[in-house]
Image (spheres, rainbow, N blue to C red):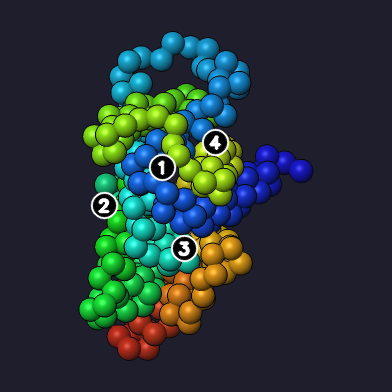
Amino acid sequence: MNKIFFAHFAAAIAALSAGGAVVATRFVMGETDPVSLALYRNIVAIICFGPVLPFIWPKQRIPLSEYGKIAMLGILFFCLFPWAFNASLQYIPAARGAVGLATIPIQTLLVAVMFGRENLTLAKLIAVGLAFTGIAFVFGAAAVDVTSSKYLIGDGLMLLGVFCAAIYSVFGRGTLMRHGPLFVTAMAMVFAALALLPLTYFHSGIVGVPVLSKQGWLAVLFLGSVSGAIQFSLFTWALRWLPATTTVLYLTLSPITAMLLGVFLIGETITFVLVAGLMFVLTGILIGSGALSGLTTKIADRWSCRLFGRRLWRRS
């Protein structure tokens, strides 16, 4: 058993936990607001990191500028992303939210190409097209249904949160590698919690121990521990040994977890539209990751030569 194998395993477990976070958030959103829930989740995660913080603290001195970068990453990924994520699930079912969450690899690819971090190839173009076809298939029903305007709001919030996660994935990896993924994750959560404290006060007028049901407390503890400290530790540890695209690709497992938990715990239904849209998204992500790029290129080359007598693009 080598580190690469365990990195794949860690990424898969983190992705499955992300699906559970969708359902847990749906459980507790009726008892609190999105901003407060993001704060509570970070506080629980920070408490979990407390006992191991002395062991993951870097030995070398970290410049203040690097702490500034960590703070920005924390606000982006542990403040804005969870707020949009939590708020979206006030309007859409868990399974629908999980499909939107599964577009993180595609949005990451788009951000990387836009900022010159990756080249845009034919396979990547096809991947983006298929993924957004799936998104349009799932989310498009709300666009033509005047009675489902809340779905449009929820979809927009989810995609906004995913965009924040994509920015973090593209620009945060260097900081994670320089100072250690666990330390950066813990400190980013601290900065995010500090940013969320005044926001929670202005939103609800009070910051203190929340009044939640037993189920609500279990959901918050799960979100902060299993789907907080543990999930992000596994995910960032996997990033150390696997390429970013491969690691983020595992997040496509989250809709499966969310759909199954949504059916058994919340009583939601799995519709043909959701499953078909998910298939488009997963196919697009597999092609974008390179898993099906060879087959895609061969098919595209064959049709290009048949129609135009030559290839219309470069292979790389």
Name the amino acid type tagged 2. Answer: Met
Marks 1 and 3, Cα distance to the nearest angstrom?
16 Å
| Location of the C terminus (image quadrant) | bottom left
Marks 1 and 4, Cα distance to the nearest angstrom?
15 Å
Image coords of residue 66 (percent x, y): 35, 21
Residue at the far right: name it. Answer: 1
Image coords of residue 229 (percent x, y): 54, 36
Between disc 1 and disc 4, the foreground one is 1
Q: Return the residue nearer the eye: 176 or 36.
A: 36
Q: Return the residue nearer the eye: 62 or 277.
A: 277
Q: In which quarter of the image is residue 201?
A: top left
Any part of residue 63 in sight: yes
Identify the element where label 1 is drawn: helix
Q: Return the residue nearer the eye: 206 or 222.
A: 206
Identify the element where label 4 is drawn: helix
* Residue for badge 3: 94
Image coords of residue 96 (percent x, y): 43, 67
| Location of the N terminus (image quadrant) | top right
Label 4–label 3 contact, CB within 8 A? no
What's the residue at 26%, 39% (across, down)? Answer: 203
* Residue for badge 2: 114
What's the residue at 31%, 23% (across, down)? Answer: 68
What's the residue at 48%, 82% (across, down)? Answer: 272
What's the residue at 36%, 70% (across, down)? Answer: 135
Structural crowding at the residue carrying mark 3, measured as other residues with C-alpha within 10 Å and reported as few (<14), some (14–19) or many (≥20) = many
Label 1–label 3 contact, CB within 8 A? no
* Residue for badge 1: 37
